[in-house]
Image: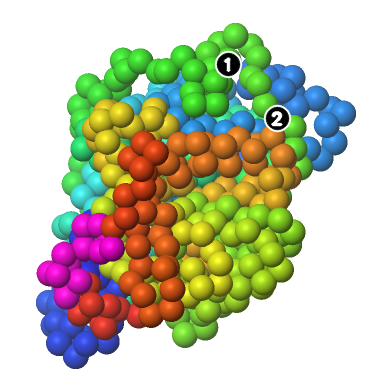
Amino acid sequence: MTASIKHLSPRRVRAMGIAALVLALLGWCAMLTGCASLPADVARPVSVARTDVDHTRLAALAAEAVPADAGRRSGLRLLPSGDQAFEARIALARAAERSIDVQYYQIADDASGREFLAALCEAAGRGVRVRVLVDDLQAAGQDALLAGFAARPNVELRLFNPLPVREGSVAGRVLFSAHEFTRINRRMHNKLFIADGSFAISGGRNIGDDYFGRSGPVNFIDMDVLSAGPVVRELAAVFDDYWNSRHAYPIEALAAQTATPEAGRRNFDAHVRPAGASGRPVTARDPLDQGSVGAQLAAGHVVLHLAAVRVLADPPGKIDADAAAQTDGPVMEGQLALMQAAHADVLIASPYFVPGRRTLDVLQRATGEQVRVSVITNSLATTDEPLVHFGYARYRTALLDMGVALYELMPDDDDAHEVAEGPRGSLGRLHAKLAVVDGQWLSIGSMNMDRRSAHCNTEMGLVIDSPELAGQVASLLQRDRLPQSYQVRSPGPGSRLQWVSQAGAQEVVHRVEPNLTWGNRMRLSLLSMLVDEELL
């Protein structure tokens, strides 16, 4: 059963297959819990994005950055550096005067998560309305913390698609909620932060130390985008759709009421306040030579690039879909349409890349029309999802045969670039979800190029028409990621694949996949027989 939750790692649900022994175990566990269920007749007061924000300082800064003659264009800037991406959220929370809306797959109970919640509490104390929507899967053990947070004036918190079992680890909660597995296997993977309806941050990062370069041994290589202008109103509408969904449960309806609201607030303060201010320095310039968002807010001028933007968002009702009706969601549809429109080149970065037949067909047509297609993903040495990597590995030969250039991120060395977002010598894992098409179009969001994102999870992203921003992403990937990657090659039909890295001017050719041991191969092969590709 351990493989059902991504080897029990705290990222995504991983389902086992239909093995009789597993089913028997799940049935036994369900009987033990008495088939726990969610509360009925839950009160969900409807609320929508505030419109009384025009006179806020953030609205004035957004209007200055996106002038009236910009038309339907919005203002955008990339956030490639983890420390600046975190600082941007905290700075916006501290500047907000009317509202903060937050939607994440995970808000970790670590230094970053606690500092983030503390900043939201401080905003609520100033009279700012704070709405927080979190997917329930990774909230294991956080009911008391989140209920104490929501007990503060001006704060509301809802959990999306909650598991009926509230106690225990992620693994235990999934195990004992298995009588509803078809539902709980579907998660809200969106990432969104909106301040005063004026600035938004979206992209690939959850809230946790390893997303912001604060985790010593392992950090994620990720990307967010700051936006202002018309696109923020569209993102706010997406948030409202999820917030008012019947799948969003107020924490008060789920958490056991073991303390008064005042006691809950005191417990929250005791847990969070000591970590409320990290005092960590923020790099003055990021890899794109941009100053921090906080410094620009303080100076009264936020530098943004004007561009047309399209919002792609799966509806919250995607989790209602019959598991057998495996149709691609709107975000995957938009991503494939973008790749189909390519004339010259497509560059994809995805930590989990399990293309499936439909994506293969799109890439085959592209390469057949002489479009250069390159894919950057994690290697076995850098992935936190070995089983998903094994699913991707099945497609490598087919991808190479159709002319796709494949790159797999190597472990960082002691001279890793700053963009790796971690301390020197830490392991950098790709987590950014990006696509650059024809040097003009940039796709950035929460969706991985795999079947889980296409069919099971809800996702959100932006498609940006901007040669400048597309060029920035392509430059970062080509300058910083490709030199730190193996290029996977096929010497010829029937030959073993090769992993080629550079040592100065010298090529180093690996004829066996790096970090793949005989034991790993056997274990992953056996697990892959039990796990359907749709669940990777």
Give the mark nearer the N terminus: 1 vs 2. 1
In the picture, the disc for residue 123 is: none
Q: CA distance from mark 1 to mark 2?
A: 16 Å
Q: Is 144 a magenta residue?
A: no
Q: How many numbered marks, from 0 up?
A: 2
Q: Is 514 a magenta residue?
A: yes
**Residue displayed at 35% across by 62% down:** 498
Is residue 203 in view from this perspective?
Answer: yes
Q: Residue furthest top?
A: 299
**Residue displayed at 28% across by 63% down:** 511
Q: In terms of secondary structure, where does tag 2 sit?
A: strand
Task: Establish if 382 lies above or below 3.
Answer: above
Q: Nearer the viewer, mark 1 or mark 2?
A: 2
In the shown orientation, is residue 298 left or right of residue 252? right
Percent coordinates x, y for residue 252 in the rendering: 34, 50
Q: Residue furthest front?
A: 506
Q: Quadrant of the C terminus?
A: bottom left
**Residue displayed at 53% across by 13% down:** 295
Q: Residue furthest right?
A: 69
Percent coordinates x, y for residue 486 in the rendering: 37, 52
Would you name the residue on which mark 2 appears? Answer: 305
Residue 57 appears in which quarter of the rendering? top right
In the shown orientation, is residue 235 left or right of residue 26? right
| Of residues 354 and 493, the one drawn nearer to the viewer in this rendering | 493
Task: Establish if 62 lies above or below 41.
Answer: above
Q: Quadrant of the N terminus?
A: bottom left
What amino acid type should be assigned to the residue bearing mark 2?
His
Q: Which residues are magenta?
A: 511-523
In the picture, the disc for residue 297 is: 1
Percent coordinates x, y for residue 410 in the rendering: 32, 47
